[in-house]
């Protein structure tokens, strides 16, 4: 059986081999009782979390960075020579093939 008790409110811990052999049960426990921790050599390595729990703890994707960039003043390219591409060079003599 898994190594933590369900009554403590802490995530339940599974050893890797046990979680592999009983993966369906690990998923079911994550759905019913919350996050499940998979350990390797006694150290936590993975959380198995239901999608509903994951959505509740995931931070929003809009951190305001795009709004910040879009709020910058518009500078037309022709007014700033630094933003213009340098003119293309041409060869002084034609290239001979063969």
Image (spheres, rainbow, N blue to C red):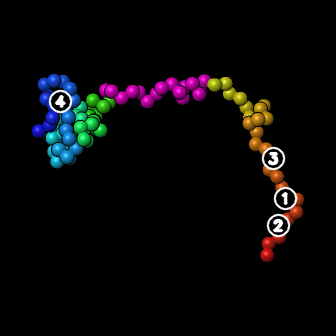
Question: Which tag is nearer the camera, tag 4 or tag 3?
Answer: 4
* Marks 3/1: CA–CA distance: 13 Å
Q: Is residue 11 above or below residue 93?
A: above
Say which residue label 2 marks. Answer: 95
Mark number displayed over residue 91: 1
* Marks 3/2: CA–CA distance: 20 Å
Say which residue label 3 marks. Answer: 87
Local crowd size for mark 3, using a 10 Å CA cut-off: few (<14), some (14–19), many (≥20): few
* Marks 1/4: CA–CA distance: 73 Å
Local crowd size for mark 4, using a 10 Å CA cut-off: few (<14), some (14–19), many (≥20): some
Image quarter in which the N terminus is found: top left
Any part of residue 61 in sight: yes
Q: Earlier in the sequence, mark 4 or mark 3?
A: 4
Q: Are marks 1 and 2 in contact (CB under 8 Å)?
A: yes
* Marks 4/3: CA–CA distance: 66 Å
Can residue 6 be found in the magenta stretch?
no
Q: At which x and y percent is residue 5?
A: 13, 29
- Element type at marker 1? loop
Q: Residue at x 51, y 25 (%)?
A: 64
Image quarter in which the C terminus is found: bottom right
| Viewer-side residue, 42 vs 18 | 42
């Amino acid at each position: 059986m898994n190594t933590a008790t369900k009554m403590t409110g802490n995530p339940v811990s599974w050893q890797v081999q046990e979680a592999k052999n009983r993966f369906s049960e690990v998923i079911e426990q994550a759905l019913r009782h919350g996050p499940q921790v998979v350990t390797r050599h006694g150290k936590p390595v993975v959380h198995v979390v239901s999608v509903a729990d994951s959505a509740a703890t995931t931070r929003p994707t809009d951190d305001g960075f795009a709004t910040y960039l879009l709020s910058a003043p518009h500078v037309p390219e022709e007014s700033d020579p630094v933003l213009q591409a340098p003119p293309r060079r041409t060869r002084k003599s034609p290239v001979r093939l063969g």
